[in-house]
Every structure is written in C-alpha cells, then in structure tokens.
Amino acid sequence: MKPPALLATCVVALLFLTAAPTAPAAPEEPAMTAGDLAQLCNGTDHVSVNACRIYMLGVTQGIAVGLHIAGRGKEAARPCVRPGIAAEDLEAVLKKRLDALDAAGLKRDAAGFIGESLTAAFPCAGGRR
C-alpha cells in the first residue's frame, strides 16, 4: 500500500475506533454522512475515487479490529479516546509510534497497530476495558 493510502486508511480506522461510545451522550452529527460518501464515490477525479476507496477500506479494517477486540473477551483492552478529540492529536500519537518502528514493525498489520497504539495512548480510567 502506498504511503498516502496508508495514512488515509489510518485516519479512517481512527474515526471508526473513536466512534466507540465511552459513555452515553447526546446524539451528534456524524463526521461523515452517507451523502458525503456518495458525493465522494460519485466523483470522477482521482482524489475522490481514492478517498472513496480508502474510506471503505478503513471502515472495513476498523470493523475487523473491533470484532477481534470483542472476540478476545474480558482480557481484551480497548482504547478510551475522549469524544471530540482532534484528528491532529490522533495523528501526532500515531506518527510518534510509527517513527519508532523497526523494519519488522513496519510490516505489521496497520489496523492492528493503530488499535494497539490507541489502547496504549488512551487507556481506560480505572483499568476499564
């Protein structure tokens, strides 16, 4: 996967992971609506086409990571990312961890890497999982 696609996939996966509720909250407007997605996917320019594909791939990978975490039962740690966190803050956390990877680490599954990185950076209070 090319670096721009990898970054976009990471961002989309982060959006999925941060959407997991940590506490009941008032309904918020989604960051991206189905109408937004339709507009991207119906675009004919290469940026729209790539953004559509990367968004779908990222959400699909995010679902896979969520199911993996859920399937591990009570021992599975999960991140507790505060609602409304800025994308720039998430990007900074992940870039720092990406920069620290060795050659073997760079070959890891990106979605799993993001999940583990967020869990380490944003642990749940009181050991909540």
Image: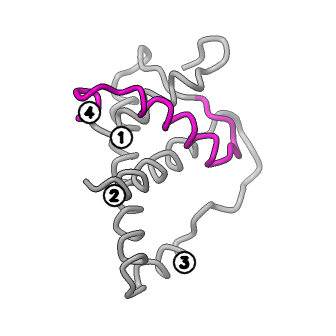
Amino acid at circle 1 = Ala
Residue 94 shown in magenta: yes
Question: Circles 4 and 2: CB distance less than 8 Å?
Answer: no
Q: Position of residue 39 (x, y in %)?
A: 49, 82
Task: Please rate how many residues cluster around mark 4, counting C-alpha atoms within 10 Å: few if below 14, some from 14 to 19, many from 20.
Answer: few
Question: Is 40 situated above or below 33?
Answer: below
Label 3 vs 2, first from the N-terminus: 3
Q: Give the label, 3 or 2, closer to the camera.
A: 2
Label 1 vs 3, first from the N-terminus: 3
Q: Residue at x 72, y 56 (%)?
A: 28
Spatial separation of the CA atoms under disc 3 and disc 4: 33 Å
Question: Is 37 situated above or below 68?
Answer: below
Circle 3 sits on which residue? 35
Circle 2 sits on which residue? 57
Tell which of 109 and 23 is nearer to you: 109
**Which secondary structure, mark 2?**
helix
Q: Which residues are magenta?
A: 80-107
Spatial separation of the CA atoms under disc 1 and disc 3: 25 Å
Q: Residue at x 35, y 34 (%)?
A: 112
Q: Residue at x 52, y 72 (%)?
A: 34
Q: Is residue 119 shown left or right of residue 48?
A: right
Amino acid at circle 3 = Gly
Q: Position of residue 54 (x, y in %)?
A: 37, 62
Q: Position of residue 89 (x, y in %)?
A: 64, 40
Label 4 vs 2, first from the N-terminus: 2
Circle 4 sits on which residue? 108
Question: Where is the C terminus found, in terms of image quarters?
Answer: top right
Amino acid at circle 4 = Arg
Tell which of 27 and 4 is nearer to you: 4
Spatial separation of the CA atoms under disc 3 and disc 2: 18 Å
